[in-house]
């Protein structure tokens, strides 16, 4: 497949493909764990079928309503009681599920990511994301449920994925964020892409984006208490292959924009 064919036709000359910058972007990621090996999870969601996960030695079997499968799984112990999971939902990896859970409060937030066929877009991107708030098991969860938030809007942050991956983020409004590369293969490149923000707990957020030029999306758990983010990228390479890559960064807030009374972004 022509390398340019997977990019948006409006891509500027020299624009990088997914695999050109993704190598090593997991350097500062928390290590994978296997705390759930031999165990299972029963998850219930608002407005969706229950999800059952059975963890084996290096994979899991899952059942979500009428859907089921077996997939390799990545598990990360984020902090006491909190885990991040991600796994493909089909053999071609054209869909994946990423989620964060808190075993103490029993709260769950999951994101189902998918890729549309060539020529189709949803809001300008070939990547789709659906969000599901839920709970572990049948017991009533504690704390506040995850919810859409405006708390990140106005912040300018630095995300260091590795010594060769420095990215600046500016959270513009409830639907978009801006980024630029400060060090790495994409140095000097930047854009404004579609974003979604959920508050999971105080100073902890689930952040996702869907790019317009490169067919790639992300799911990241931001923990500003520890200054770490953990997540995945899902995208299409120049050869047309779908890849789900782990990623993670050291994160810090650099500045905040205050709007005058009566003026606020979307």
Image: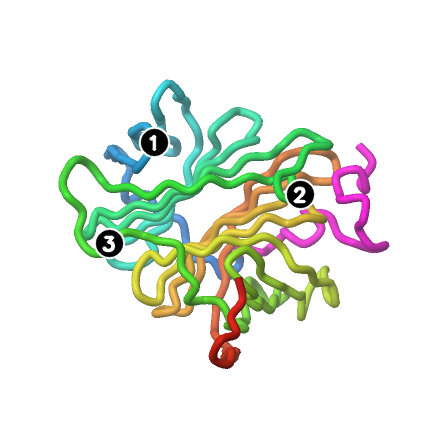
Q: Residue at x 30, y 45 (%)?
A: 108
Mark closer to the observer (2, 1): 1
Horizontal relation, residue 238 to residue 171: left or right: right
Residue position marked by numbered label 2 in the rendering = 215
Q: Residue at x 49, y 57 (%)?
A: 248
| Residue 160 horizontal/vertical position (percent) | 55, 67
- Label 2: element kind: loop
For the record, the magenta segment spans: 1-26
Sequence-first disc among 2 and 1: 1
For the residues labelled 2 and 3, say whether their Cβ atoms are less than 8 Å apart: no
Work out how far the residue at label 2 is from the one at label 3, CA to CA, in angstroms: 33 Å
Residue 98 circle label: none
Q: Nearer the viewer, residue 72 or 228?
A: 228
- Residue drawn at 53 percent across, 71 percent down: 157
Badge 3 density bin: few <14, some 14–19, many ≥20, Cα 10 Å: few
Mark 2 or mark 3, whichever is nearer to me:
2
Camera-near label (1 vs 3) is 1
Image location of residue 233, percent across then percent down: 55, 47
Q: Do labels 1 and 3 touch, CB within 8 Å?
A: no
**Quarter assignment of residue 56:** top left
Question: Disc 3 marks which residue?
Answer: 81
> Is 30 drawn above or below residue 139 in the view shown?
below
Q: Is residue 75 visible?
A: no
Residue 228 picture location, percent across and down: 42, 64
Question: What percent of the width, then of the height, locates residue 32?
Answer: 40, 49
Q: Furthest-front residue in view?
A: 262
Q: Which residue is mark 1?
A: 48
User: Counting residues from the N terminus, which is met first, the one under dot 1 or under dot 3?
Assistant: 1
Q: Is residue 84 left or right of residue 233?
A: left
């Amino acid at each position: 497949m022509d390398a340019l064919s997977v990019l948006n036709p409006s891509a500027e000359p020299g624009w990088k493909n997914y695999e050109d910058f993704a190598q090593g972007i997991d350097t500062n990621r928390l290590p994978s764990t296997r705390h759930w090996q031999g165990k299972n999870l029963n998850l219930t969601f608002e407005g969706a079928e229950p999800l059952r996960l059975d963890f084996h030695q290096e994979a899991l079997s899952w059942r979500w309503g009428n859907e089921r499968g077996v997939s390799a799984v990545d598990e990360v112990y984020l902090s006491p009681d909190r885990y991040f999971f991600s796994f493909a939902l089909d053999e071609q990896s054209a869909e994946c599920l990423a989620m964060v859970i808190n075993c103490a409060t029993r709260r769950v937030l999951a994101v189902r990511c998918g890729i549309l066929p060539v020529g189709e877009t949803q809001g300008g991107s070939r990547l789709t994301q659906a969000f599901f708030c839920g709970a572990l098991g049948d017991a009533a969860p504690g704390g506040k449920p995850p919810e859409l938030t405006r708390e990140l809007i106005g912040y300018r942050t630095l995300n260091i994925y590795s010594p060769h991956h420095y990215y600046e983020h500016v959270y513009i409004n409830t639907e978009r964020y801006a980024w630029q590369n400060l060090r790495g293969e994409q140095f000097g490149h930047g854009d404004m892409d579609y974003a979604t923000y959920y508050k999971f707990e105080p100073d902890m957020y689930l952040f996702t984006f869907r790019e317009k030029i490169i067919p790639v999306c992300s799911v990241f758990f931001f923990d500003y208490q520890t200054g770490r983010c953990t997540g995945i990228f899902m995208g299409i390479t120049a050869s047309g292959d779908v890849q789900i890559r782990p990623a993670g960064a050291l994160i810090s807030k650099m500045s905040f924009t205050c709007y005058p009374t009566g003026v606020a972004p979307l």
